[in-house]
Amino acid sequence: MELVIINQIEVSMKKLVYLFSLFCIISSFAFSQTLYTNVWEKSKVKSNYPKYLDSTGNNTRALSYGKVGGNDRLFICTRNISASVIVLNAATGDSVGKLDVTGVTGGTYALSDVEVSSDGVVYSCNLSLGSGSDTMFTVYKWSTETSTPVKAISYRATFRLGDKLTVVGSTTDNSIIIYVAAASTNKLVRFTTTDNGATFTPEVVTLSNGNSGGSPSVGPVSLGANSDFYVKSVGKNLYRFDKSGNILDTLSGSIIATGSSAVRAFSTGVNKYVAVYNYGSGNENIRLVDVSNGVPSSRMVFITPSLGSSSNSNGTGDISLKDNGDGTFDLFVLGTNNGFGCYRTRNLNGASPFTVAMDGLNMFTEGANLMGKGGAANHYFAFDKDYFYFGFAHNPLSLDTLDIRVWIATYPLLNTGAKAAPFGAITFDSTFYTPNYSVFLENGFYSEIRKWNGTAWSGDLGFVGSADRFGGWSGNTFFSELRVRRDSVGNPANIAYAVTVEKEDNSGLFTSFPIENGTNTSVKYFYVFKDLGNGVVVRQNNAATIPVELSSFSASVSGKVVNLNWATATEKNNNGFSIERSSNGKDFSAIQFVKGKGTTTVQSKYSFTDNNVASGNYYYRLRQIDYDGSISYSKTVEVNVTVNPNTFELSQNYPNPFNPSTNIKFTSGKSGNASVKVFNTLGQEVATIFNSNVEAGKAYEINFDASKLTSGIYFYQLKEGKNMLTKKMLLIK
């Protein structure tokens, strides 16, 4: 199908950033109602800023959440009077004591940052300039809240280390990794252990895109030394790197400003998020970004309130998070000189709040169909079994003075309802369709839904599943979108709709979609979709399309590597190829997405390498996806992978995603004890599914029942002596 690209008015990046910041400040209350709640806050704004912290000295720069000794704790690292780590009750933000700092000395600052491993060990580092007499970077650890500190790392640095520390994983199974990035240079050090944290081995990683800025922070995407990671530093964009430091993506400064530092990445269900600390006047807060569709298609989820406006000349601060196990997360933020707070997200499992992707591919509503149509803006519609999704890009606007209405006709071929709307700026004069529902968004967020009863509009009906309503502004450009539960409008099989953006006093229009004859004086046409019940969309007034012509698709094996190669003779509106793999030729799972060439009449060649594949027969196919979400499949190719049976090997679980059980295969490289454990995204162990003696060369298969766990991403880890392998799996209930 063809996606029509609509011309838009371009705005300068400076104006975009300014208007985006203005909107976020204005609408922070609306965001707090829908996407997060304020659990507690101790800040300049709330006038309850703790006296034990400095107000202007830039001496308090770090905090971290962790469960230590069974207690939910928040740790704040400060050098206000002397090097200290304050211990707080994470549920209230109240101070409950300090860590013992006996013997902590050295460095430009003896303590600079603090972190907690998933098994409750507290780590804090000094700040080393890496020059002159200050070259020893030191990390201390506390096994309990009352223990004395022990040196965990002493590393002679040649660059500045210690502005920010990141700790993921556990010492109990050697999954712990400590990351520290060097300020104003292109180095990062990754510390790992094989003796449960008694000693750590450094690995220097060179970042391919040049020097970091000040106070650089690392946000690993997952557990394990093979994980990609984000780096955020003062004055720089947010970058994503692979494990070797090769840059993969850059996030637009219009979404996460360069005026930010600390970063954390986390996942839940099929959704992926990045949170950063944003500093400076009007900020001193958290920005949570949805990166589920990939970094280039990131969307802002929410921005927390400002902690204060005291000067933060170094741009320092920190964030941390807690997985509550029910799809919600507690996000903690500290803004230097301004305070700290805790904010709880709504349930982030299930469909992402930003599921309508502007590139025409909805990754989270399988089978959804999107469209683009002429007029004043890019315009999208999608649906799944539960929701209708509406999205439209538009000219720059400030939603504090404009309201958005979506006019819906649920029986577009039969409706003889309202000929005019008695409120709002628009008069409907549709040739074929008239609305019987009006969804009203004020300041970009749901306010009400009304129904035409034949003579007048009802009062606000409320929404089915009102806690799950969503509307908002997001994206790399000006883009408004919303979703409505299908049962809120009677779960229709057909739908027609139009959108108006009106002045708040109803005195006129800002724009409308679609428009007639280039004017915004009335809406005479609706977008029409039929046969929604069976997943088929009929798009109106759309020219015929040329399909993607796949000329070849083949697979070859080299050891544990499967190489896929394919070519197209022509492409029309080809978004790309989802590569799917199966071990039985029936049940396929997506393993990678390869971007297509769009529209071209020139032959295009593609390839993909599936690395580290375990022994067995495998089947591969391509799921080709158009910009509008239409799909088609290639033929299936089969390969046989044969690996030395004495290889220490962990296979990908099957099926994946799964619900509620899945099978995990592994082969031991030697006889002895082996274990397989499961961890959540914070590195917390949730299950031990195998712990027994094994025979070298023998293949083992385990069935893992996750019926007691919530939906989300989990990691399973095979350990045999000092050898360890980790893989990711997805539970969807």
Image: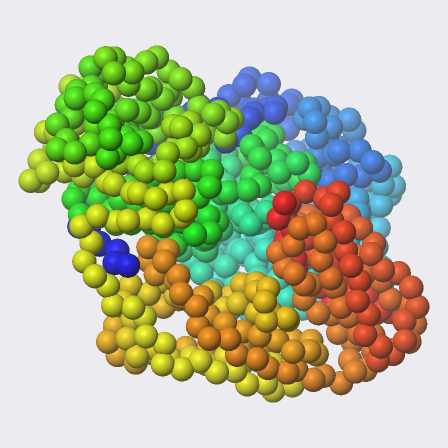
| Above or below, comparing residue 317 to residue 133 in the picture | above
Res. 610 image quadrant: bottom right
Asked if residue 699 can be seen in this view, the reply is yes
Between 241 and 158, the residue placed more toward the observer is 241
Residue 124 shows in this picture: no
- Left or right: 132 in relation to 239: right
Q: How many marks?
A: 0
In this view, 339 is above or below 686: above
Image coloring type:
rainbow
* Residue placed furthest toward the left: 517
Say left or right for 433 vs 662.
Answer: left
- Residue visible at 48% across and 83% down in the picture: 554
In the depicted structure, whether residue 183 falls above or below residue 426: below
Measured as percent of width and height from the top left, residue 497 is found at: 26, 35
User: Which x, y percent locates residue 661?
Assistant: 72, 53
Q: Nearer the viewer, residue 468 or 194?
A: 468
Residue 479: image quadrant is: top left
Give the residue at x 41% y 32%.
Answer: 491
The x, y position of residue 502, in whole percent, is 21, 26
Residue 94 % position (x, y): 71, 24
For the N terminus, which image quadrant? bottom left
**Which image quarter is the C terminus in?**
top right
Name which quarter of the figure residue 341 lies in: top right
The relative height of residue 330 versus residue 105 in the rendered view (above or below) is: above
Please tell me which residue is depicted at 84% across the width and 69% down the height of the picture.
Answer: 720
Q: Residue at x 40, y 82 (%)?
A: 552
